[in-house]
Image (cartoon, helix red, strand yellow):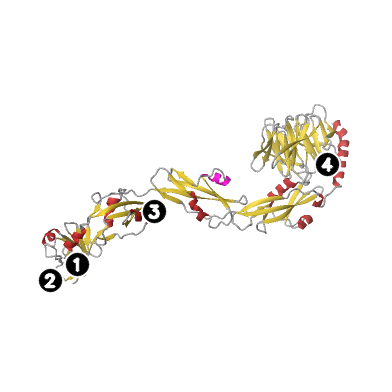
Amino acid sequence: MSWIFNVVWILSQFLSTTLVTQASTILTSSALKPQPPTLQFKYCDPDGDGKIELNLEQISQEALNYYGLDPNDPEAILICNSDGSYVKLNNPSQEPTLEYICQVVGPLTDIAVNDVGDVFVNTFLSIYKMDATDCSYSSVFPVIYGEVLNSLSFDTGGNMYFGFADHSKVYRYDADGLTDPYIWHDFGQGNAGGDFVMVDGKLYISWDDGSFNRLYEVTVDADYNYVSHIDKMELPEGTYGLASEFGSLYGVTIDWLYRIKLDTHTFESVIYNTFGNGDWYGAAGLHEGMILNAALFSSSSDANNNTNPLPPLWTNTQSGQQTIYVRIENETTGEYVIHPVIITVNNTPQLTQPENLMQCSDDEVNTFDLQLVEDELLQNVTESVVVSYHELPEHADSGTDPLPVLFEMDVSQKTIYVRVKNRNNDCYAVTNFQLIVKSSPELAPLVTNRTERSLSQCYITTSGRGYFMLDEMYQQIVMDGNSNYILKYYSSFSDAQNGYNRIPKLFYSDEGSVYEIFVAVTNDDGCTSISNFFLDGNCVKYTLDLGSINFPNFFTPNGDGIHDFWNIYGVSEKLQKETIVTIYDRFGKKIFGFKPYNIIGWDGTYNGRPMPSSDYWFEVATPIGARFTGHFSLKR
């Protein structure tokens, strides 16, 4: 191990000098930094009051990614190449772009950044410190012959870690330079496949177990000493390096940089190696050795004084737009910057759930005007909006594949998703309604004369007026066997279509010369069909024949020989012989039936038992189809 003692003095002098120099420059005012464009966050408020609960931890992280400690030095990842160069990936969390930095020696197997921003690279045999201003470098750490140095990193305390491809030991060199490099931990098997980087107080290692690259999560104590580790997950094959930048963990293979989602154990692609400088062997976040904290405040004075930080979950106190302030501080040096952050909360259109659109049709294809829902849908919307209709909820959310407002469909029911977007911002709301096609009642077709379909049976009132019961045509009109439809009658087809000038179901034959009746039949779904029939005008003749019918208003079947029977009289002998009289009680129960010509009349009994005093109804039916109804009283 004599090689270690040869480099201890070099490392000690180098690291100590660097730390003292950097610590002497402390920024205490954001005014000393050039200001980038103000970071803005825009939200949509679903309830329309202009206020919303915000996750400030997410905003702090994005502000840290955007501003960094130096607005001219935002988030970035350094990647070393097999040809001995290294590049910088700018804005890895937003719109990543690659930038060539330096050519060193080759091949480079890893790259690292310490807690004060110094860049180090290594080959299989040596570690170098870089000067990015002129791409010069100096050898810092030679290794003994036969060892294959393949990993290099710093923790947030400035301690250096390095590992080899041919054994399971990880070495550390402390930031104070007071001790020799020593074995930090021996994992017993496998070897370092990549870096050792810090994220949220944990040390993460890409470890080659001989078959796969595994992600080890190492718990360390306050002095960064090993405590324990767990095997977190399998990494993509060939993950030779890890990088952390502003709280995010990244992995790198020879041709791919990806983000590691620790909470879901998934990977998110960032960028592929198309730069043309060989394979990627290692990576380092430009600020991964630093501890940068970001906190949000309601005023710039609170941010400067580091007092009254806003809680992790916070609701804006000013509706519409409000400015808060982020303080980004290097925990090691005390350097900090303050930047405004604009929070804008726009109202989401407040939609009213529309009624479903329904059509009554028996056609195979039906056309709906989707815009018919808009009066109801937008009755509480005050903003200028754009309305679009979609077949799928995901299309409504993305605003893609809108439907034509005159929409044709060949099914009986369909869900339509409607998106209403504010014209002045990206806020939108989505709801849905149904398109429903219901079947109309199946009716007999329209006819042109009374010989095809007519109502001939009529009735006579006690005053001698003849009338038709139009509902008696139900069975001839309704063809699908349903007995629960609603029938309404009109004297013309247009009236039936529009529901105008409805005529009563009991239609008197002396009320004009209407002989064609149009009937609108409506089912339980509200669908209506129209048919027609004719009236037989002979009801007027029947009225004349029956106009002389008389009957007693009461009778007293008590055996005294006076009014003991009830019968009609005044009918011609010819009609009387064939006329049938039926008597009912007040509940509609048939009590007695007879031909008035054959018997003296009803004696007031039912099956030989006397009926009680009450009102009774009768119907007179003649052989020519005329009917006459009335009522009388039985008194005892």
Q: Which label belongs to residue 526?
A: 3
Q: Where is residue 67 shown, x and y percent of the image?
A: 75, 47
Magenta stretch, residue numbers: 391-398
Q: CA distance from mark 3 to mark 2?
A: 59 Å
Q: Which mark is first along the chain, 1 or 3?
A: 3
Alpha carbon distance from label 2 to label 1? 14 Å
* Residue on which the image places disc 2: 559
Q: Residues within 10 Å of mark 4 (few under 14, many from 20)?
A: many
Three-letter residue code for mark 3: Gly
Sequence-wise, the earlier of marks 4 and 1 is: 4
Q: Secondary structure at mark 3?
A: loop
Find the distance from the CA under tag 2 to the CA under tag 4.
134 Å
Under circle 2, the secondary element is loop
Residue 372, can we see it?
Answer: yes
Give the amino acid type for the residue marked by disc 2 in the picture: Gly
Tell me the crowding category of disc 1: few under 14, some 14 to 19, or many 20 or more residues within 10 angstroms, Cα based. Answer: some
